[in-house]
Amino acid sequence: MNNYLGKNIAAQRHTARMTQEQLAELSDMTINCLSKIERGVVKQIGAGSLYRMPRH
């Protein structure tokens, strides 16, 4: 399966020089959940969580 979403989130987080902890807090999710999304364990993310992620 393609993990485009998780890889894109991780790449954008790195570009913004943010930790998983910082992004998780801003997105109102746990670090564990964000980590699973970035690794492709969780393949879906709610629209609200995506909306809360900072855009750079």
Image (tube, helix red, strand yellow):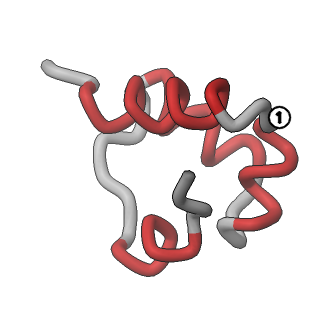
As drawn, 38 above or below 29 = above
- At 82% from the left and 34% from the top, the residue drawn is 19
Disc 1 marks which amino acid? Thr
Q: Residue at x 75, y 66 (%)?
A: 26
Q: Which residue is mark 1?
A: 19
Q: Quadrant of residue 35?
A: top right
Residue at 78% x, 31% y is: 17
Residue that lies at the very extreme toward the left in this rendered image: 1
Residue toward you, 18 or 42:
18
Q: Where residue 47 appears, x then y in whole percent?
A: 35, 74
Q: Residue furthest front?
A: 56
Q: Is residue 2 above or below residue 36?
A: above
Q: Is residue 30 left or right of residue 14?
A: right
- x and y, in percent, of residue 16 in the image: 69, 37
Q: Secondary structure at mark 1?
A: loop
Identified at 51% across, 24% down, the residue is 11
- Total numbered circles: 1
Left or right, 56 with respect to 18, comes to left
26 or 46, which is in the foreground? 26
The image position of residue 1, as x and y in percent, is 14, 19
> How many other residues sit within 10 Å of disc 1, few (<14), some (14-19) or many (≥20)?
few
